[in-house]
Amino acid sequence: MTRRLDQAQAQCAARGAQLTALRREVLELLLLRQGSAKAYDLQDDMRVRHGRVAPTTVYRALEFLMEQQLVHRVDSLNSFVVCNLDPGPHDHHHDHTMMLVCSRCGQVTEVHDDPATEAIRRALHVDAPGFHATGIEIKGVCGACQAAAA
């Protein structure tokens, strides 16, 4: 986890942004959850550590983390998930990220598919220049849930 937090620190520094202790802590708490989490879950985690914490504190930190492309919002779950910081040879197109969302357990898996991402980018540019993709969520049942049901 330290490596992921250090990567996030470096990514922010490269963009001229500051990953403050509070923002880093919200990212750490999200990493500790090992999946998606609602802002209020993170607020509860912070409350355990620090006592009273305002929801706006957590939301502002999450907003910053999304701006820095460190966290994705999962609209269908009203939650947040840490971005895959090691997408391999693929570019991280934050606005066109595809996420597989399990409708049973809520597990979210970020998918990098350059041809699909490029097709979305082209379609938006040519056919819908006034539209902006904020992420694509594909719902289904993950392998673990399928195996558990069998």
Image (cartoon, grey):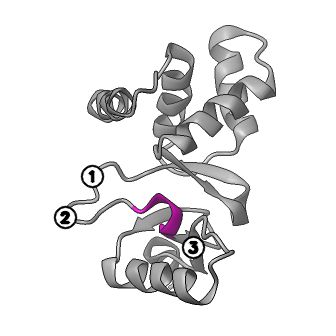
In the picture, the disc for residue 97 is none
Mark 2 to mark 3: distance in Å? Answer: 20 Å
- For disc 3, the neighbor class at 10 Å (few under 14, some 14 to 19, many from 20) is some
Q: Is residue 137 above or below residue 64?
A: below
Mark 2 to mark 1: distance in Å? Answer: 9 Å
Q: Which residues are magenta?
A: 93-98
97 vs 14, left or right, is right
Q: Which residue is mark 1?
A: 86
Give how far across and how far down residue 111 sits, in percent. Answer: 40, 70
Q: Amino acid at mark 3?
A: Ile
| Residue lying at 34% horizontally and 35% vertically, measured from the top left | 11
Q: Which residue is mark 2?
A: 89
2 vs 1, front mark: 2
Give how far across and how far down residue 88 sits, in percent. Answer: 21, 60
| Residue lying at 44% horizontally and 51% vertically, measured from the top left | 83
- Assign the N terminus to one quadrant of the image: top left
Q: Is residue 30 above or below residue 114?
A: above
Q: Is residue 95 magenta?
A: yes
Q: Is residue 133 magenta?
A: no
Q: Amino acid at mark 1?
A: Asp
Q: Which residue is mark 3?
A: 136
87 vs 140, left or right, is left
Chain-order first, disc 3 or disc 1: 1
150 vs 134, left or right, is left
Mark 3 to mark 1: distance in Å? Answer: 19 Å
Image-quadrant location for residue 47 = top right
